[in-house]
Amino acid sequence: MKLSDRLKRLADLIEKYKKGDVLADIGTDHAYLPCYLVENKIISKAYACDVSQGPYESSLSTISKHHLIDQVEALLGDGLEPILDKKVDMITIAGMGSYLIGDILEKNRQYIKDDHLLFLQPNANTDHLRQYLFSHGFMIVDELLVKEGHHIYDMMVVKKSHYIADEYDIEFGPILKNKKTELFIEKWKKQYVVYQNIMKGLSLNHPRYEELKHKIEMIEVILDESL
């Protein structure tokens, strides 16, 4: 099975940090990721979960097509609810907005134990997700950026642990801000221009003006001579 660049990088991250053999993929994309992980013997069992009937049926089709009925189980339900009676080692939530990912984690936060590993890939507003994680007893073990098309996605490995974060950790990522890869620089140079353009259309007393000004100043600090 061939995965998109985004899902392949996520699969590689799971293989690198693998803990246990059972994974639940929340909001699964046709069960591609769980099937790939099982086919390549990275894990032995997976749950492909989705809240909608259409994606659930697509998952059933993919699982059947790849003859993985005994190892990959499609479950219909909202967020983590389909696995509340299951024992899993790892949880993936990918391809959603940060607010939705935060809501999913918060709704059944008591299910997530110290020995769980979470692999999260928000589509936007990653600072919001980091803020949620740091405020609710999670820490980021590792994170990376992946580019697919014109979009640069954040991926992170998360576990339950106390971490004291500052505003730079939240905005840029505690790992990413130190690595400062080419993709990181590309992403924040683009965002720098976006913020500047937005500010041009705002009055000095607009509620967002000072917020954006501060974000621009933070980018200047983090990129230093890269701008």
Image (cartoon, rainbow, N blue to C red):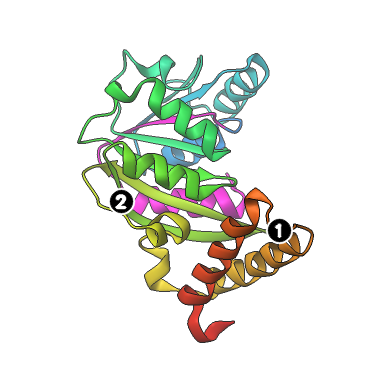
Q: Which residue is mark 2?
A: 17
Q: Quadrant of the N terminus?
A: top right
Point out which mark residue 47 bears: none
- Badge 2 amino acid: Tyr
Looking at the rendered image, the disc whose residue lies closer to the viewer, 1 or 2, is: 1
Looking at the image, residue 16 sits to the left or right of residue 189; the answer is left
Q: Are marks 1 and 2 in contact (CB under 8 Å)?
A: no
Looking at the image, residue 57 sits to the left or right of residue 176; the answer is right
Q: Which residue is mark 1?
A: 149
Q: Position of residue 219 (x, y in %)?
A: 53, 70
- Badge 1 amino acid: Gly
Q: CA distance from mark 1 to mark 2?
A: 26 Å
Extreme-bottom residue of the structure: 225
Q: Position of residue 35 (x, y in %)?
A: 50, 35
| Magenta stretch contains residue 153 | no
Q: Position of residue 18 (x, y in %)?
A: 30, 46
Extreme-front residue of the structure: 205
Residue 40 at least partly seen:
no
Q: Position of residue 208 (x, y in %)?
A: 64, 52
| Residue occupying image coordinates x 50% and y 23% | 49
Q: Quadrant of the C terminus?
A: bottom right
